[in-house]
Amino acid sequence: MTQRSLGKAIALVGTLFLLHSAFSTYEHLSYLKAADLDKSSIPLEIVMECVVSALVALIGVVMNAQPFKNILMQEEIKKMTIDRMDTRSSFISFDHRKVPSLKAQKERSL
């Protein structure tokens, strides 16, 4: 079993236990409401299950993550073509817009 598939399995187990703790909390609060008891704090077992399952799910997600990629400039330049490297915005000129006549356009170019 690879690390990624193990991480997926651990994340799934942690998520299922987290859902179970949420359902247990809902059931506990429903019981308190039905029995007309004071709303006391949630039992320690449910709180511990929630915290532990969240940590287990987090560990599973971290194990499932892909390795970091290099961000060195040399690595990025190797991927580029010359056409992509040579495109610069310095060649774009917007001076020719909104010139009403050919005479005004010639005066601008001088």
Image: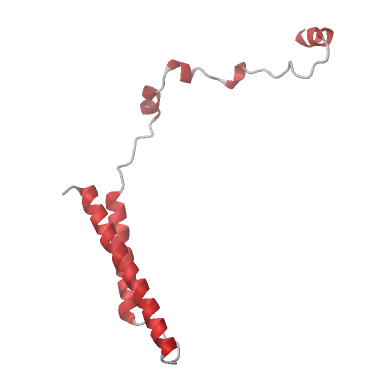
Residue 108, given in percent of the width and then of the height, sits at: 79, 11
6 is higher (above) or lower (below) than 72: below
Quadrant that contains the C terminus: top right
92 is higher (above) or lower (below) than 50: above
Q: Which residue is at 28% across, 58% downward?
A: 11
Q: Nearer the viewer, residue 35 or 6?
A: 35
Q: Nearer the viewer, residue 94 or 17?
A: 17
Q: Nearer the viewer, residue 9 or 89?
A: 9
Residue 20, given in percent of the width and then of the height, sits at: 32, 71
Residue 38, given in percent of the width and then of the height, sits at: 45, 91
Q: Which residue is at 80% across, 16% downward?
A: 99
Image quadrant assignment for residue 16: bottom left
36 is higher (above) or lower (below) than 72: below
Q: Which residue is at 30% across, 42% downward?
A: 67
Q: Which residue is at 44% across, 16% downward?
A: 82
Image quadrant assignment for residue 47: bottom left
Image quadrant assignment for residue 40: bottom left
21 is higher (above) or lower (below) than 32: above
- How many badges with numbers are in the image? 0
* Residue 90 shows in this picture: yes
Residue 57, given in percent of the width and then of the height, sits at: 31, 60
* Residue 51 shows in this picture: no
